[in-house]
Image (cartoon, helix red, strand yellow):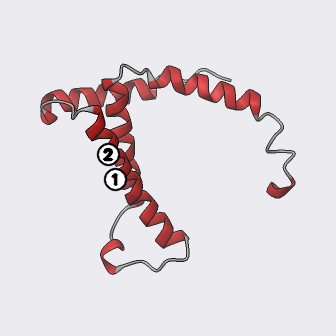
């Protein structure tokens, strides 16, 4: 797989700078984990109502999916920073593994034809 510049590293640095200058300090990891669950729930609500069978409440119609996804990413970046996880390196390993493991899996899946 081709090497990519380090956009996740840049995002981790941006979040760390924001936390230190605006956010004062990181919330503890358990708080951030709860916040992540909350943000994922907000994404799920939008998807369920706009792309699923549930009707959308009037109060949810102005919610922007991209903003909610960005909230999820922000908390993931916080958790990575506070656990000293290099997301760029982890991402590259994951993509390499998925590419090798799934090289023929999806193209040979008749359900995807």
Residue at x-position 38% and y-position 37%: 76
Residue position for label 1: 38
Q: Nearer the viewer, residue 16 or 26?
A: 26
Q: Secondary structure at mark 2?
A: helix
Q: Secondary structure at mark 1?
A: helix
Q: Is residue 5 visible?
A: no
Q: Position of residue 64 (x, y in %)?
A: 37, 62
Q: From what the image shows, is residue 15 above or below residue 34?
A: above
- The answer for how far apart the CA atoms under marks 2 and 1 are is 6 Å
Residue at x-position 50% and y-position 68%: 48
In the shown orientation, is residue 73 left or right of residue 89? Answer: left
Residue position for label 2: 34
Labels 2 and 1 touching (C-beta < 8 A):
yes
Q: Position of residue 7 (x, y in %)?
A: 44, 28
Quadrant containing the N terminus in the rendered view: top right
In the shown orientation, is residue 103 left or right of residue 33? Answer: right
Graded by Cα atoms within 10 Å as few (under 14), some (14 to 19) or many (20 or more), the crowding at tag 1 reads some
Graded by Cα atoms within 10 Å as few (under 14), some (14 to 19) or many (20 or more), the crowding at tag 2 reads few
Q: Nearer the viewer, residue 84 or 6?
A: 84
Residue at x-position 29% and y-position 29%: 14
| Residue 101: quadrant of the picture | top right
Q: From what the image shows, is residue 84 above or below residue 26?
A: above
Q: Position of residue 73 (x, y in %)?
A: 39, 41
| Residue 110: quadrant of the picture | bottom right
Quadrant containing the C terminus in the rendered view: bottom right
């Amino acid at each position: 797989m081709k090497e990519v510049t380090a956009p996740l590293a840049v995002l981790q640095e941006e979040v760390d700078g924001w936390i230190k200058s605006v956010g004062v300090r990181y919330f503890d990891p358990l708080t951030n984990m709860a916040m992540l669950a909350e943000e994922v729930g907000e994404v799920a609500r939008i998807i369920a109502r706009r792309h699923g069978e549930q009707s959308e409440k009037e109060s949810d119609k102005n919610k922007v999916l991209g903003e909610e996804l960005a909230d999820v990413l922000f908390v993931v970046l916080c958790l990575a920073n506070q656990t000293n996880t290099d997301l760029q390196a982890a991402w590259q390993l994951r993509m390499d593994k998925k590419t090798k493991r799934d090289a023929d899996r999806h193209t040979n899946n008749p359900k995807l034809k």
